[in-house]
Each structure stands twice: as structure tokens, then as C-alpha cells.
Image (spheres, rainbow, N blue to C red):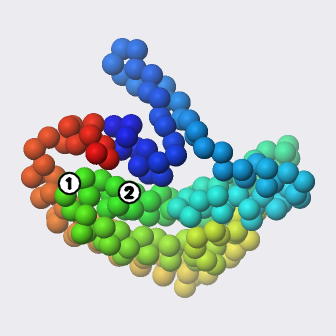
């Protein structure tokens, strides 16, 4: 199972602590040094909002949000507006949804023998990227989350278009994954063995 999780990027290891057969704690280890800390030395604090999201092309929003929150922690009475919290949360969830599609089609599905179907990840991933771009102006590597809130304004037209992108993503999940891909899992004789086998 650890091998399969590692295939997300191949750079992280998870240590499961299961003293009684139930996961009580998980440690995550990154054994490679990317050097972002060294790049940030001597820079202005706000430069991190531009540099850190570029650590990864898959989870740039997560790095942007973590950076904004780290900088916000410096201020004692800083208040984030409810609207800014909602926008941040939506973008974060869109990125998570996008990454789940990528993980499914690029990591898990090929283990079932469906390597030719990896391009299916593009359609829902593109939809979620467009949704994120309504907040960030681009995707990946958005810079809309700033210290104290967000640097974007969502119009009624943005809300309508984002709603349409969400509907299309749900339709893809229901029609393509739930209905279509379920046959692949039903045909797999031993899912537990597959998960243990990981990337073999």
C-alpha cells in the first residue's frame, strides 16, 4: 500500500503506526531536498507567495495557501473575510478533485491493465483547472491568495461558469468512472493484492 501512495510523486514515504492493527498515527517523510528553503533565504517575505507555489505543478494551490497562512500567523489580530475563506476553500477542493482524477487514471488504473486510458484524466482535470483559473487568473501557479485574504473578485458570470464546470465534472465522474470503470474493478480478482503490489 505504501508503494502505491508513493507513486503520487515518488518522493514521499508514509510510516504507519498500527500497534493494535488500527492506524493510530502516520509519519510522512520526504527524503529528497528540493532546496526551496535555500532559494527563499534573503528574499522578502512576500516573495514566498510567488516562489512556493512553483514547488510543484500538481499542488501549487496547496503551497500557495500554506504560504499565505504561514505569513498570516505572524499577525495576531488578522481577520480573513468569510468570502476570502470560501474562495480559498473552493480552489483548494477543486485542486484536490483534479488530483484525484490524475491519481486514478495515471497511477491506479494502469495497475489494472488500462494503461491506454491515462488520457481520460485530461477532461476532468481541465475542467477543474478552468474553475481554479476563475480565482487565480491562471492555472497552475496561481497567486491570488495573499496575506489577509484574496486578490480576486468573483462576478455573477464567474459563479455561473464555475457551476457549469462543477456540473460537467460530476457528469464525467458518474457517467465515465462510476458506470464505465466499475467493470475494471469487478474484473480484478484480488484488489488487496493489487494494492500491496503497488507499482510492480
Q: Position of residue 195 (x, y in %)?
A: 27, 41
Q: Is residue 133 left or right of residue 44?
A: left
Farthest top residue in view: 20
Nearer to me, 98 or 145: 98
Identify the element where label 2 is drawn: helix
Residue 112 image label: 1
Is residue 82 at least partly visible in the picture? no
- Tell me the quadrant of the picture where the C terminus can be found: top left
Residue appearing at x 90%, y 54% in the figure: 42
Q: In this view, does 151 lie to the left or right of 105?
A: right
Is residue 119 at least partly visible in the picture? yes
Residue appearing at x 44%, y 64% in the figure: 98
- Tell me the quadrant of the picture where the N terminus can be found: top left
> What is the count of numbered marks?
2
Residue 161 image label: none
Farthest bottom residue in view: 157
The mark that comes first in sequence, 1 or 2, is 2
Indicate whether 9 appears above or below 149: above
Residue appearing at x 50%, y 77% in the figure: 130
Identify the element where label 1 is drawn: loop
Q: Is residue 1 left or right of residue 25?
A: left
Nearer to me, 149 or 118: 118
Q: Is residue 46 left or right of residue 137?
A: right
Query: Mark 2 highlights which residue?
Result: 103
User: Label 2 neighbourhood size at 10 Å, few (<14), some (14-19), many (20+)?
Assistant: some
Amino acid at each position: 500500500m505504501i508503494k502505491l501512495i508513493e507513486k503520487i510523486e515518488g518522493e514521499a514515504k508514509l510510516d504507519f503506526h498500527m500497534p493494535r492493527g488500527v492506524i493510530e498515527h502516520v509519519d510522512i517523510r520526504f527524503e529528497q531536498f528540493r532546496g526551496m528553503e535555500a532559494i527563499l533565504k534573503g528574499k522578502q517575505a512576500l516573495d514566498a507567495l510567488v516562489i512556493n507555489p512553483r514547488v510543484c505543478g500538481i499542488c501549487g494551490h496547496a503551497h500557495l495557501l500554506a504560504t499565505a497562512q504561514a505569513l498570516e500567523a505572524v499577525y495576531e489580530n488578522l481577520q480573513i473575510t468569510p468570502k476570502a475563506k470560501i474562495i480559498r476553500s473552493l480552489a483548494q477542493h477543486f485542486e484536490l478533485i483534479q488530483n484525484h482524477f490524475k491519481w486514478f487514471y495515471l497511477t491506479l488504473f494502469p495497475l489494472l491493465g488500462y494503461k491506454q486510458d491515462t488520457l481520460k484524466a485530461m477532461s476532468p482535470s481541465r475542467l477543474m483547472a478552468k474553475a481554479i483559473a476563475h480565482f487565480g487568473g491562471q492555472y497552475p501557479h496561481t497567486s491570488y491568495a495573499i496575506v489577509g485574504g484574496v486578490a480576486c473578485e468573483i462576478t455573477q458570470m464567474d459563479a455561473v461558469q464555475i457551476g457549469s464546470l462543477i456540473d460537467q465534472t460530476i457528469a464525467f465522474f458518474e457517467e465515465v468512472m462510476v458506470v464505465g470503470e466499475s467493470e475494471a474493478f469487478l474484473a480484478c480478482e484480488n484488489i488487496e493484492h493489487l494494492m500491496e503490489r503497488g507499482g510492480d
